[in-house]
Image (cartoon, rainbow, N blue to C red):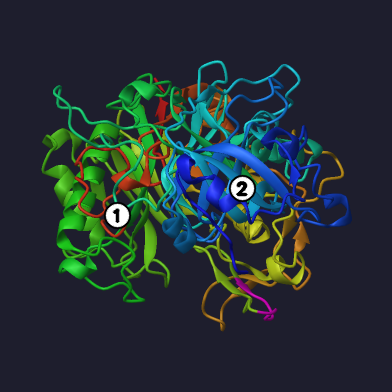
Amino acid sequence: MKYKYAAIAALCLPAVMSNYVFANKHQSIMAIQGESFHSPMVNVDKKKYQSDKTYQVVGIITVLQSKKLGRDIPAGFYMQDSKGDSNPRTSDGIFVAITASELKDLKLQSGDKVTVTGKVKEAYGWTQLAATKINVQSRGHAIKPTNLVSLASDKSLKETLERYEGMRVTLTPSTPLVISRNFGFDRRVKRNNLALSVNTVNAQPNQHYAPNSKESLLHAKHIADNELILESFNRAPAGTIPWYPSFAQMQSNNQYNYMRIGDGVSQLSGVVGYSHKSYRLFVESNATSDNFKKNNPRTDSPKIKAGEIKVATFNVLNYFNSPFGGDQNPLKQNRGAKTQAEFEVQRTKIVNAIIALDADIVGLMEIENNGVSEKSALVDLVTHVNKQLPMDKQYSFSSDKNRKFNGTGAITSQVIYRAKKMSLTAFTIIDMPLQDAPASGKENGKNFMRNAITPTFKLKGSGQELTVSVNHFKSKGSTCWEDVALQHNKNIDNQGSCEQFRVSGAYHLAQELTKIKGHKLIIGDLNSYALEDPISVLTNRKHLDKAYKITAARDTFIGSNKTDRRALHGNKGAIINQSFGYLNTVRDRHPDAFGYSFSNVVGTLDYILASASLEKYIVDAVEWNINSPETTLFEYGRKYTGEMKKFNDVYRSSDHDPIIISLSFN
C-alpha cells in the first residue's frame, strides 16, 4: 500500500492539511481501546480483525519501535493521549504499525504530537492502528509513566494489563510481581527475555494437581492469565540484558549483580505491548540491584539437618571430556563444553558444588558414557574433586567390569561414595525398558531409557545396608509411539512426551528393586513432575480419582539384544494399578520446593524416593536451589553469552538443582 505521510514541524502544519480528507471519523485512543480485550471498532465475533472505517486519532509518541523484533513485534511507535479520560477501564495508549523504512523517512521522535489516520486492527489480540497517514502537529511533549495498579474487579493480571495496553507504565509494589522465569531463551518468540508472575512463582500444573484434572487445567489457565514478559525493543546482544546494564558486573564487596526466580520486581518503567498470547513490558528504564527484592537468596551450601549419612543426586549437565583428551563415548558425540576454557569452567563449578554438597553418596546424571578408565569423564571428575578433600572425605566409585559402557547412549548415570564411611556389598545395573513399536508418522517407535546404577552399601557406623538406585528416565522432549499414534502430538495432560514409557520404566524399576532386601533409595532425574503418572506408580495414588488410569507404553522390552530380550508390556500396553509406596522425601517436608524451571513454570523432576522402611530414619531432605532459579547466562557455555564474564562459583553449574537427604540409623 502506498502511504501518504507528512512529518513536519507545527509551524508548517497548515500547508499540508489542505489535501486531508475530512470524511475520516475522529476518535480518541480510549474509545478505540474500549473497556474489553478487543476494540469496539472491530467485530471479532464475526471473525473480522480490521475495522471497516478509517479513523483519525491524536496522541503523543512515547517510544519508537525502530525495527521489527522477531516475527511478532512490527516496526512502529507507541502513542498516548495527553490527558486520558479518567476511566481506569480504558487504555490511554495504542501501538501504531508502520514499516521501519517509513518510520526512518518520517524522522519521528518521542514527544511528537501526531495525528494518525488508519484502520483499527486486532493483531492476534493486540489492538493496533494500521496507519495510512501521519501528521506531526508539534514536538517536545512529555508523557510520564503511570503506576500500574490492579482494580478490585480485575480477576487476573491479564485484565489489569489490558487496561494499560500501549501505555507507558511503572511497576509498583501495589501489584506484587516476582520473577517466574529468569532471563533466557523464550521458545515461543525465539529470543531472550524474562517472565514475571503475581505474588508467587508458577508451579507446573501437575506439581500440585493430578494430570488432566479440573484443578490442573484451571491452574494452567491461571498461569497464562497472570504473566508479564519483560522485553527490550531490540534483540538482546549475547551475554547482556539491555535494560539491566550492571547485570553480572562486580561490586565493591566482591559480589556481582544477579537475580533469581522468586525475586520481587518493582519500579521498572516501559510500555505495555502484546504478542503470542502474553502481555509484554518493553522496558525503558535501566534496572539496578535496587529493583529486585531478594525473596529467594543464594546459599553457599545446603541448609539441611545433620545425620549419620547424606545422599545426594546431581545432574551434571553433559559433563564430557572426550574432546579434551578423554575416551570416546559409543556415539562419538559431544553434548558438553565446546572449548577447553568452557570445560574448565564447567568442571570447576561442578567440583565446587559437589564439595559444598558434602554428601557421602552422590548419584550423577548426564556424565559422559565413556567408561571408567583414567581417561573417562567419571575419573576426571572424581580426581579433581578429591584433590580438594582430605583423605577421609575422598570419593571412590565402582562399575560393572563386564561392561565398558552403560548402555548405548552418549550420556549415562554413575555413583560416587566415601569408602571411609561404607563398604560396597553389591553392584547391580538394572536394564531399563526399551520401546520397539511400529513406526507412526515421524515417530519410528524405537525408544530407550538409561539403565539404573544400583549399588548396595553397608554403613560402617550402624551396620545397616542401603541400596541406592541412580536413574535418568526418558525425557519429555522427544516423542514416543503413544504421543504420535494416540495423542496426535498434543500435550493433552501437561505431562510432556513419553509419559507412558516413563510409567513402564517406573513399574519395571520398582519390580526389580523388590528383589533386593533392605532399605532402598530411588534417586535421580525421573523427568516427571510430583503428581504425574510415573511418580504415582513409585509412591501412591492418593491424589487420583478411582477411575483414573495409569497406562504403560506398548511394545516395551527388557534387554537390547533381540535374541535374549523379554517382553515387559505387549502391543496393547498395560494399565498399572499398583503403587509401590516409596516416600517423596523432599515434598513430604517442603511441599513447595522446586528444582527445575522450564517455560515460565517450576517444579520437581529430580527425586530422592525412600522405601517405607526408611521413614523413621529420615532426618531431613532438601532441594539446594543453586541452578533452577538462576539465568542460563551463568552456565559454562559461551555460544549465547559473548564476552560476558564467567564465574567459578556453584550457581548455574547445571540446569537441575541437587537434592540431598540426611539419614540417621543410630
Q: Nearer the viewer, residue 544 or 5?
A: 5
- As helix, strand or loop, the secondary structure at mark 1 comes to loop
Nearer the N terminus, badge 1 or badge 2? 2
Q: Total number of numbered labels?
A: 2
Which residue sits at x=69%, y=45%?
A: 56
Secondary structure at badge 2 equals strand
Q: Quadrant of residue 501?
A: bottom right
- Looking at the rendered structure, the kind of residue marked 1 is Ser
Q: Identify the residue under disc 2.
A: 116
Residue at (70, 43) in percent of width and height: 579
- Give the quadrant of residue 479: bottom right
Q: Which residues are magenta?
A: 435-441
x then y, percent, for residue 176: 55, 21
Please determine whether, in this image, residue 442 is positioned above or below residue 340: below
Q: Which residue was labeled with disc 1?
A: 398
Q: Is residue 609 above or below residue 488?
A: above
Residue 575 painted magenta: no
Main SS of residues in magenta: loop
Front position among marks 1 and 2: 2
Q: Where does the C terminus fall, quadrant-wise?
A: top left
Left or right of residue 234, residue 14 in this image: right
Q: Is residue 48 rendered to the left or right of residue 185?
A: right
Q: Residue furthest bottom?
A: 563
